[in-house]
């Protein structure tokens, strides 16, 4: 029974892949989340007139909660914007046309059963909540950069935050690197805007770590380290199929074509492994890459490209899985 269910699921996924349906739904959900995030980007950091910075922080936090709830309602916004009235009817007609063109009766029944069980097409509930979680993470970072930080200083420094900062500081390697094999790394001689800032405004890594701005960077880095694996899992939930459809499935087939194809895939896997390790260091270990992100919201936006490293990590994981499955 389980084997039959897996075959049915594969039939549904094959059909979704051939008609690019999953990407269409994923794109529409992302549009909604990006729109809500853009509202936060342009409105976070407001200061009620005549109120203290701490009161402004509280007001912005309440506003963050409101926007987070708006993101949680993404399925509702999707139905209102993309799946109602004539739009819904048009979509149903297109799906019906797709189904009528399927000659394999078992595949057609599997797809119809999938539609009946889910009430609609993908993304499934797990994928929807994974997308929403990713939206929450980005929204919180915008709140942190625009509202919790003022003039490169934390305007609220509770004891728990200071404990986190002290823990990160105690677990940072500074040049010469890797003497103590600590968890995080900081190097003013590295590449990127963060390293350049350290070289410009501080005499050494130790001077930087003694500054108020370092508290901002270390607390933010602790947040990024905390969400690293949850974000990776959420992205895998959303993109596992898409990455396979980009050509990885065809790449995996090369190992079945003989020694040449096997060696080709082995070389690809080796270089992707090296790239994945570099991405892990940048996203999890290196404090440098987060420094420029907390300067202001434009710095956060400019440095956001670093998150592309997650895609390379997922690609490599998918490669390793394909060797065994």
Image (spheres, rainbow, N blue to C red):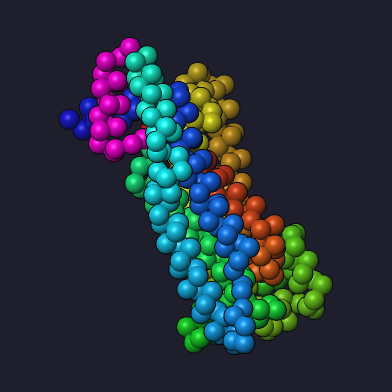
Residue 257, percent across and down? 50, 18
Identify the residue at horizontal 67%, vertical 72% (top origin): 174
- Quadrant assignment for the C terminus: top left
Q: Count the marks: how many? A: 0
| The furthest residue to the front | 85
Identify the residue at horizontal 29%, vertical 38% (top origin): 118
Magenta stretch?
102-121
- Compared across the picture, whether 25 is left or right of 198 comes to left
Pick the residue in front: 170 or 9.
Answer: 9
Q: Is residue 295 above or below residue 319?
A: below
Whether residue 36 is visible, yes or no, is yes
Q: Is residue 22 above or below residue 42?
A: above
- Quadrant assignment for the N terminus: top left
| The furthest residue to the right | 200
Residue 170, percent across and down? 56, 79
Identify the residue at horizontal 34%, vertical 15% (top origin): 100
| The furthest residue to the top | 103
Residue 173, percent across and down? 63, 71
Q: Is residue 205 above or below residue 78?
A: below
């Amino acid at each position: 029974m389980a084997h039959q269910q897996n075959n049915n699921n594969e039939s549904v996924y094959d059909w979704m892949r051939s008609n690019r349906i999953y990407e269409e739904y994923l794109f529409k959900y992302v549009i909604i989340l990006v729109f809500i995030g853009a509202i936060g980007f342009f409105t976070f950091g407001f200061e009620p007139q005549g109120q203290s910075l701490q009161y402004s922080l509280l007001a912005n936090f309440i506003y963050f909660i409101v926007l987070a709830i708006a993101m949680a309602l993404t399925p509702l916004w999707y139905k209102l914007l993309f799946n109602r009235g004539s739009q819904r009817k048009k979509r149903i007609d297109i799906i019906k046309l797709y189904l009528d063109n399927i000659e394999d009766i078992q595949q057609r029944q599997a797809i119809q059963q999938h539609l009946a069980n889910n009430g609609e097409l993908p993304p499934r509930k797990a994928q929807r909540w994974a997308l929403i979680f990713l939206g929450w993470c980005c929204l919180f970072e915008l709140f942190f950069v625009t509202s919790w930080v003022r003039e490169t200083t934390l305007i609220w420094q509770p004891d728990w935050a200071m404990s986190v900062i002290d823990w990160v500081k105690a677990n940072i390697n500074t040049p010469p690197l890797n003497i103590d094999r600590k968890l995080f790394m900081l190097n003013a001689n590295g590449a990127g805007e963060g390293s350049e800032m350290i070289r410009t405004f501080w005499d050494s890594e130790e001077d930087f770590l003694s500054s108020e701005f370092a508290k901002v960077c270390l607390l933010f880095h602790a947040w990024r380290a905390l969400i690293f694996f949850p974000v990776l899992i959420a992205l895998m939930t959303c993109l596992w199929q898409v990455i396979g459809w980009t050509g990885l499935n065809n790449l995996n087939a090369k190992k079945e074509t003989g020694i040449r194809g096997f060696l080709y895939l082995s070389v690809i896997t080796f270089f992707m492994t090296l790239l994945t390790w570099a991405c892990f260091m940048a996203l999890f270990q290196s404090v440098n890459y987060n420094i420029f992100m907390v300067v202001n919201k434009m710095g956060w936006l400019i440095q956001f490209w670093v998150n592309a490293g997650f895609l390379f990590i997922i690609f490599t994981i998918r490669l390793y899985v394909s060797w065994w499955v």
